[in-house]
Image (cartoon, helix red, strand yellow):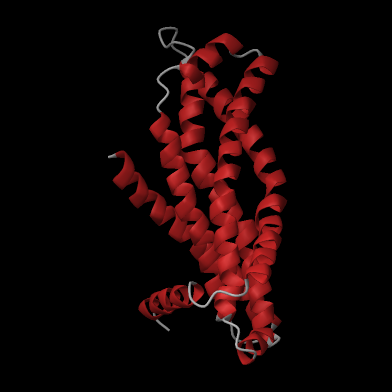
Amino acid sequence: MNYLEHIGRYFLMLGQVFKRPQRGRVFRSAISRELDELGLKSLGIIMFISFFIGGVIALQTALNIESPFIPKFLIGFATKRSVILEFAPTFCSIILAGKVGSYITSSIGTMRVTEQIDALEVMGINSLNHLVLPKIIATVFFYPFLIVLSMFLGILGGYVAGVTSGIFSDVDYLIGIQSDFNPFLVRYAIIKTLVFAFIIATVPSYHGYYVKGGSIAVGKASTQSVVWTIIIIVIANYFLTQMLLT
């Protein structure tokens, strides 16, 4: 099957996802479950990585500023820009693509190979709407909060790294954070996060829904879905940056 056929099936799948919604109570229960599985259970890894990566960015920036003519507040400024523009929205989304994407593909793929999806269709339930739409809503609404938290912890990690190592002063770092703050950059990061969240929810769902074979095929589909999700995120990141910042 060529790439154009995959793209066509993907968009046809999206058309079915947004049709024939299920009963309100069942739908709300599914969203609550997905918020827990796809959002709350990802909090720990995002918080841990954000804090320490922010510290690493600050330390590397400080160690590479050798000229005495370069002001030390640029350490905080560079850390702030790096975390807000790229690390929080893009790098964290790639981490989520690996963690959440494999879960989505394996869970839907298992339902496909065990004929649970066929049973839903026999009962007259729109299986794509039932399985995929709650995942889209959960990721699109929760991941911006996750990314904002990542921004805060990344900048905080840089501050703690400077205070504990003594390589740069906390005053210089705070001045750098406060200097030339542009609120649009946060909006830009949130816009990217919304697009990436939609990709993280739908691309793995596509690979899981159309998997064929047994448990080995589900494992291969999980790997393939993570790879393609990351590729699409990187491509989308390039075009979004070009459209929003240039």
Left-right relation of 201 to 166: left
Name the residue at 60% across, 68% down: 223
x, y percent for residue 99: 65, 57
Total numbered badges shown on the rendered structure: 0
Name the residue at 56% across, 25% down: 58
Q: In this view, does 226 lie above or below 141?
A: below
x, y percent for residue 215: 70, 81
Left-right relation of 68 to 24: left
Name the residue at 47% across, 43% down: 190
Let me know if residue 65 appears in the view: no
Left-right relation of 100 to 76: right
Q: Which residue lies furthest to the bottom in this view?
A: 122
x, y percent for residue 50: 62, 37
Q: In this view, does 16 lie above or below 74?
A: below
Name the residue at 50% across, 44% down: 89
Classify the position of the C terminus by image quarter. top left
Q: Which residue lies furthest to the top in this view?
A: 68
In the image, 245 versus 220, the foreground residue is 245
Q: Which residue lies furthest to the left in this view?
A: 246
The image quadrant of residue 126 is bottom right
In the image, 94 versus 124, the foreground residue is 124
Classify the position of the N terminus by image quarter. bottom left
